[in-house]
Image: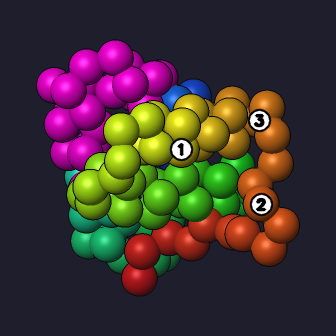
């Protein structure tokens, strides 16, 4: 069975990426590695989906978008900091937002 995704580890990676372009590249690679891992693993080997994992996947999909598109200076950083606050449990996800695993 796959281990549960780790929100705190992902938050640490995002915070490090805010400080370094090289770390941002590593975060991008990590995001795609996680997506690929869950995509290529049979569903019966996935852990049960809980609220923490919903936050994790919401952030993963947001990161995939934020890291692969161009944004105005400062806009990406503000959004990345907001994602960290979700991962650390400092604020709830926006109403009606839930993360889903890749199919």
Residue 36: % across, % down: 25, 63
Earlier in the chain: of badge 1 and badge 3, it is 1
Q: Residue at x 45, y 23 (%)?
A: 15
Label 1 neighbourhood size at 10 Å, few (<14), some (14-19), many (20+)? Answer: some
Describe the element under mark 2 as helix, strand or loop: loop
> Is residue 41 shown left or right of residue 53?
left
- Most extreme residue toward the bottom is 103
Residue 48: % across, % down: 65, 64
Describe the element under mark 3 as helix, strand or loop: loop
Q: Nearer the viewer, residue 92 or 6?
A: 92
Give the spatial CA distance, label 1 vs label 2: 13 Å
- For label 3, the residue is 89
Q: Is residue 103 above or below residue 7?
A: below
Q: Residue at x 42, y 43 (%)?
A: 76
Label 3 neighbourhood size at 10 Å, few (<14), some (14-19), many (20+)? Answer: some
Q: Which mark is residue 19?
A: none
Q: Is residue 82 above or below residue 21?
A: below
Q: Residue at x 70, y 49 (%)?
A: 52
- The magenta stretch spans which residues? 12-32
- For label 2, the residue is 94
Query: Cβ–Cβ below 8 Å for labels 1 and 3?
Result: no
Give the spatial CA distance, label 1 vs label 3: 16 Å
Q: Is residue 27 magenta?
A: yes
Q: Is residue 27 above or below residue 5?
A: above
């Amino acid at each position: 069975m796959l281990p549960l995704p780790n929100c705190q580890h992902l938050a640490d990676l995002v915070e490090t990426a805010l400080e370094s372009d090289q770390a941002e590249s590593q975060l991008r690679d990590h995001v795609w590695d996680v997506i690929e891992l869950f995509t290529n693993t049979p569903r019966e080997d996935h852990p049960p989906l809980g609220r923490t994992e919903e936050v994790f996947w919401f952030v993963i999909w947001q990161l995939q978008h934020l890291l692969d598109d161009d944004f105005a200076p400062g806009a990406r950083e503000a959004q990345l900091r907001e994602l960290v606050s979700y991962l650390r449990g400092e604020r709830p996800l926006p109403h009606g937002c839930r993360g889903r695993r890749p199919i």
